Amino acid sequence: MMTRKFHDLTLPLLGLGAMRLPLLADGSGRVDEAETRKMVAYAMQNGLNYFDTAYPYHGGESERIMGRILADYPRESYLLATKFPSHVAAAGRSPASIFEEQLAKCGVSHFDFYLLHNVCEATTPTFLDPELGIVDYLLKQRRLGRIRHLGFSSHGKMDNLREFLDRYGGEMAFCQIQLNYLDWTFQNAREKYELLTSLGIPVWVMEPVRGGRLARLEAAEAAALRALNPEISPAAWALRFVKDLPNVRMVLSGMSDMAQLRENIETFSRPDPLTSAEREALLALAERMKNAVPCTACRYCVDGCPADLDIPMLLSAYNAFRLSASEAEPVEALPADRQPSACVGCGQCVRACPQGIDVPAHLKAFAAGLERRSR
């Protein structure tokens, strides 16, 4: 197992994410705990001892399941990470009651790694609310040794990331971001990685295969990778891309069966760095995969918009939403008069657009997608 140094720890470069654990075959949606137990045993035997869960995963059961399974191992033999749920605090629960519940669910007296979960446009006001005092409470738990390393995960845009780092960057030991060869350019992962690196903040990777999208390529996409090397699977290509980055200290993969676990551990058994030609080929493939609305953000459409919408921003968000519904969160946090549904369909933007983009049609489709998501 490849490793990376983090403070006084030697971390396995691959961690097991507990958001997509194997499910029972009865269609109930419940986790197959027996199979998960086998996967944890195999992981531990092969040098993977970092396990990442969170309060809401698997309907709140992930923390309990991981706690029961890891109870079979000496506490010092594994590293456990979980996350603080802002939505629970916003509903009225105190930080202390949430944290104590998580310790009890996991059956531990401390967390090795603890994250503020998904710092983004919608959650930052909760995390920064002085009356809730979330960060102050967690910093106290760190001083008490109940949190060994405090960090945060982020799906926010660059401005939001900078805002949080300006406030609390000095207190954060690491940051977990969505990073893969598609999002390297599509979701500004490169800029986020470089910002964190410039601040000396180690990067944890989530979604290295983008929820399975980069492991389940379309025929033409897969053919492009087979032309590079027919022996390497699409998932391995994606994992090789992120493990090459020197400031990445942890790559989390939500493995759902033993076959995925075995393959990923094999991928992380040796450095096998990408050549410059391979890296360029992956990024070229990413450009073809985007299939995006071809907005160049020239902003000609903005002047004269009767609804005063930030059309380039909305089209960029729509491109992201088409690849992953979770990307809707920053737009859902906007006031109603700034959302795509506020478009009046006048067509002024179409006449102004050098690319001839049918902006009202795309905004209408985006609004419909957001409406379906909210049901």
Image (tube, helix red, strand yellow):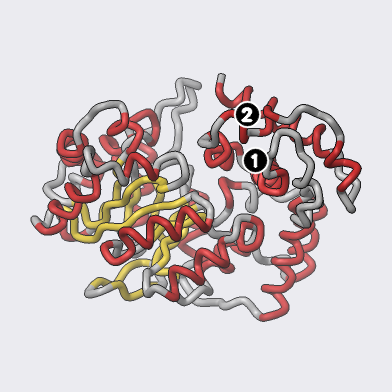
The percent position of residue 15, horizontal first and vertical second, equals 39, 57
Residue pictured at 40% horizontal, 41% vertical: 123
Label at residue 370: 2
The percent position of residue 79, horizontal first and vertical second, equals 25, 57
**Label 2 Cα neighbours within 10 Å, binned few <14 / some 14-19 / many ≥20:** many
Label at residue 192: none
Residue type at tag 1: Phe
Residue pictured at 68% horizontal, 33% vertical: 340
Q: Could you tell which of marks 1 and 2 lies nearer the N-terminus?
A: 1
Q: Which residue is mark 1?
A: 321
The percent position of residue 362, horizontal first and vertical second, equals 78, 36
The answer to whether marks 1 and 2 mark residues whose Cβ atoms lie closer than 8 Å is yes
Determine whether the residue tagged by mark 1 lies in a helix, strand or loop: helix
Image quadrant where one finds the N terminus: bottom left
Looking at this view, is 36 or 203 the one in front?
203
Residue pictured at 37% horizontal, 74% vertical: 200
Residue type at tag 2: Leu
Looking at this view, is 294 or 8 the one in front?
294
Relative to residue 16, is residue 277 drawn left or right? right
Looking at this view, is 136 or 10 the one in front?
136
Relative to residue 17, is residue 283 drawn left or right? right
Determine whether the residue tagged by mark 2 lies in a helix, strand or loop: helix
Q: Is residue 323 visible?
A: no
| Count of numbered badges drawn on the protein | 2
How far is disc 1 from disc 2 in space, using C-alphas?
9 Å
Looking at this view, is 168 or 82 the one in front?
168
Q: Is residue 264 visible?
A: yes
